[in-house]
Image (cartoon, rainbow, N blue to C red):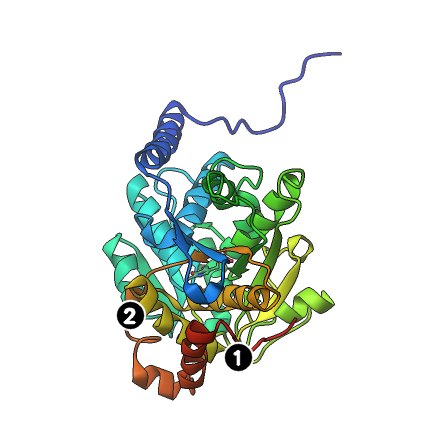
Amino acid sequence: MPHQSAPYPDRSLTAAELDWHCHAISRINADYQRSADTHLLKLQLPCFQGSTLYLKDESIHPSGSLKHRLARSLFLFGLANGHIKQNTHIIEASSGNTAISEAYFAQLLGLPFIAVIPKNTAQEKIKKIEFYGGKTHKVPPHNIYEEAAKLALELDGHYMDQFTFAERATDWRGSNNIAERLFEQMQLEPNPNLDWVVMSAGTGGTSATIGRYIRYQHNLYKNTRLCVVDPDHSVYADYFSTRDSELRSSHSSRIEGIGQPKPQPSFVTSVIDTVLKIPDPASIATIHWLESILDRKVGGSTGTNVYGSLQYIAHASQQSQPINVATVICDPGSRYLDTFYNPDWLKSNDIDHAPYLDQLRNFENTGQLIPIKF
Ligand SMILES: Cc1ncc(COP(=O)(O)O)c(C=O)c1O
C-alpha cells in the first residue's frame, strides 16, 4: 500500500504540556501521601444494648468533608482524560462541599476555579471556597447544572460535573476508597462484621462506591447491606422503588449536600439494598443530640445518617440481637452555624425538631425509638 501521510491531527502533548501534566499528578499524589486516614469512631451507648455504631469521620480531611476524596478523584480523572491542562478554568456545580474540596485541589495545581452554587448556600461554605482561592457564581438552585455547563463553554474550561462522574471517577475496587478503608479498619474489632452501612446520597457517588465494593467483596462481606437514607423533598427514595427517571420534586432538599429534586446519573440504585426516608426534623434533632454524645457539632447529613442507623440499632435491641452499623460523619457543624444551628433559620424553614429530640432522649433511657419502617 502506498504510504500516505495521515490526514489526522497530531494531538500529542508538547514537552511543556507533558511536564505540567506530570507535575500536576505528582502534586496530587504527594498531597495524598502526606495525609493519614480518617478515624473510625466507635460508639457503644448503654441504650444500644450490645450493638455498636461506627462513625467514619470524613470531616477531618484537610478540606473538611467527605468530598475531599471525590475532588481528588475528579482531578485525577480530568487529568488522565486530558481535560485538565495548565491554566484550564475548573468549573463545578456544587452546593458547597465539593466546591470547597475542588478549590483546595485547584489551588494546589495553580488553576482558576469557579463554583456555580445555589443562592441559598451557607455563607460559611462560600467563605471556605474563597479561602482556597475559588470564586463563586450564585444562581437559583434548579439552574446550577445548566449554568455550570454554560460557563465552562464560555471560558473554554472544564466542567467537573460531579453528578455525572462521581460514581465512575472513584475506583470502587479499592485504591483506598472509603469502603475499602472502612472494612480494613473493622478488621481488629471483636466482631469485624458490619450488618448495615447507612449512607445518605447527594450525587450518590459515595453510596455507589460502598455498594459496589460490598458486592465486589461479597465472599468476605456476604452479610453486609447498604441502606441509603433520604431527606424530605428528595426523589431518591421513590426513584429506588420505581426507577422512574421522570420523578421530580417541586422543592429542594433542606439538608444541604444530600437529596435531589430529580434522579442524578451517579445515584446507582442496583447496588443499594434498601432506603429509609428520614424526616428533616429528625435529622436536625439528631445533630443536636449527637453534640452531647460526641462533644462537637456535625453537619445535617450526618444527622440523617445517624438517625437511620439508630433505627436499625433500636430494632436490633428489640429482637435482642446486637448488630454492627457503620455510617459517615460527612462534614463539621461549623459550616452550618447560620442554618441548622440557628433557631431563626429552623423556624423560617418550618423545622420543629423538639419532638424528635425528646424521642432521642427517651431512646437514650429506654433503648426504644419510634420506628420509621420495618
Ligand atoms: C455534607 C454532605 N453529606 C453527604 C453528601 C453525599 O455524598 P455523595 O455526593 O457522595 O452522595 C454530600 C455531597 O455533597 C455532602 O456535601
Task: Say which amino acid is labelled 2.
Answer: Gln
Task: Say which amino acid is labelled 1.
Answer: His
Q: Image height check: is 135 above or below 77?
A: below
Q: Image height check: is 25 above or below 360?
A: above
- Assign a secondary structure to mark 1: loop
Residue depicted at x 59% and y 77%:
249
Viewer-proximal residue, 217 or 310?
Answer: 310
Find disc 2 in the rendering and name its residue: 123
- Assign a secondary structure to mark 2: helix
Residue located farthest toward the right when viewing the structure as drawn: 1
Asked if ligand 1 lies within 8 A of label 2, the reply is: no
Q: Image height check: is 184 above or below 98?
A: above
Horizontal relation, residue 268 to residue 355: left or right = right
Q: Position of residue 343 (x, y in %)?
A: 31, 83
Viewer-proximal residue, 139 or 70?
Answer: 70
Q: Position of residue 51 (x, y in %)?
A: 50, 58
Find disc 1 in the rendering and name its residue: 251
Q: Position of residue 215 (x, y in %)?
A: 66, 44
Can residue 113 be seen here? The reply is: no
Q: Image height check: is 305 above or below 283?
A: above
